[in-house]
């Protein structure tokens, strides 16, 4: 993400508006603070348990992240930054705080993408600063075993995928897929947020962080829409919005939550049947 790209985005928005078509909407820009846990490049406060001299990788210096965020925020673009490790998340929260102080108050909905591993107390900062926690439940299925190996049981247990804590901090919690890294199937992501049972496990990973069905549905619909400034167009079935909805194979949410065999019988987009 460079200044040229900002100007490029801004130019396109000026010429064409944010909605390039019914399917492509220019929301903002994404930058990277760190790498991933799987490759030992998520930026951590304490070293990796399985690699004791390694603290992970900071992709961009604070100064350049700050300058890019200032420029992009001033031009009206929403900023979303990928942060996986606990130190990366604190760094971006500090940076967002400084930008908000410098550019003044407005509805900017700064986002942190993934927010996977958080230091004690960091979940509360999302709510206090009004930062969107844009999280992908299905990542935890692959990450549970790796997190325990790389962070040790204690750190993994206290700080990983803190969905309920983020919600309790009054942060806007938006669920998504991070496609193509994981499946785009929303029903699976909603169930994962409710159950947190990784493959080969019999029990939930950090059960206190499971979401209720209602909270998971809200996070996957209206909150996700809000995280993109699209709550007036999508995210709920309401007058004046696009009628985007699915018809499920069961009318029992209990069956959905416990058996997980519920599937999609039909999909409507803008009120028109698109599937089957
Ligand atoms: Zn990412």
Image (tube, rainbow, N blue to C red):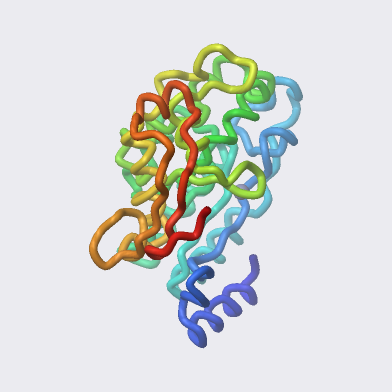
Task: Tell me where residue 254 sits by quadrant.
Answer: top left
Q: Position of residue 84 (x, y in %)?
A: 59, 40
Which residue ends up furthest to the top in the rendered image? 202
33 to the left or right of 109: right
- Hey, which quadrant is residue 216 in on the image? top left
Residue at x 35%, y 61% (from the top left corner): 243
| Position in image of residue 192 (x %, y %) | 50, 30
- Give above or below for 33 relative to 190: below
Q: How many numbered circles does the render carry?
A: 0
Q: Residue at x 66, y 49 (%)?
A: 180
Find residue 164 and report its image quarter.
top left
Q: Quadrant of the N terminus?
A: bottom right
x, y (%) of residue 50? Answer: 74, 21
Front one among 131 and 12? 12
Q: Residue at x 70, y 42 (%)?
A: 57
Residue 93 to residue 250: above or below: below
Residue 131: image location, x then y, percent = 39, 49
Q: Which sits in the foreground, 190 or 132?
A: 190
Given residues 245 and 14, the one toward you in this image is 245
Residue reaching furthest to the bottom = 15
């Amino acid at each position: 993400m460079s200044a040229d790209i900002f100007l490029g985005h801004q130019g396109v928005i000026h010429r064409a508006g944010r909605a390039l078509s019914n399917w492509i909407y220019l929301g903002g820009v994404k930058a990277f603070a760190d790498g991933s846990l799987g490759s030992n490049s998520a930026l951590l406060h304490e070293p990796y348990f399985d690699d004791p001299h390694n603290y992970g990788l900071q992709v961009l210096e604070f100064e350049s992240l700050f300058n890019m965020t200032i420029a992009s925020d001033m031009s009206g673009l929403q900023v979303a930054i990928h942060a996986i490790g606990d130190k990366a998340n604190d760094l971006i929260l500090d940076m967002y705080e400084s930008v908000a102080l410098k550019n003044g108050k407005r509805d900017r909905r700064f986002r942190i993408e993934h927010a996977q591993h958080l230091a004690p107390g960091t979940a509360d900062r999302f709510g206090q600063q009004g930062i969107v926690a844009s999280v992908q439940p299905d990542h935890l299925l692959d990450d549970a075993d790796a997190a325990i190996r790389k962070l040790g049981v204690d750190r993994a247990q206290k700080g990983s995928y803190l969905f309920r804590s983020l919600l309790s901090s009054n942060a806007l919690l938006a669920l998504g897929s991070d496609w193509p890294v994981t499946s785009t199937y929303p029903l699976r992501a909603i169930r994962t947020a409710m159950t947190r049972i990784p493959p080969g496990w019999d029990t939930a990973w950090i059960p206190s962080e499971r979401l209720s069905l209602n909270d998971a549905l809200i996070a996957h619909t209206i909150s996700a829409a809000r995280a993109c400034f699209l709550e007036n167009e999508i995210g709920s079935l309401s007058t004046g919005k696009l009628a985007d909805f699915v018809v499920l194979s069961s009318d029992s949410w209990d069956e959905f939550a416990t058996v997980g065999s519920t599937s999609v019988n039909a999909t409507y987009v803008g009120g028109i049947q698109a599937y089957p």
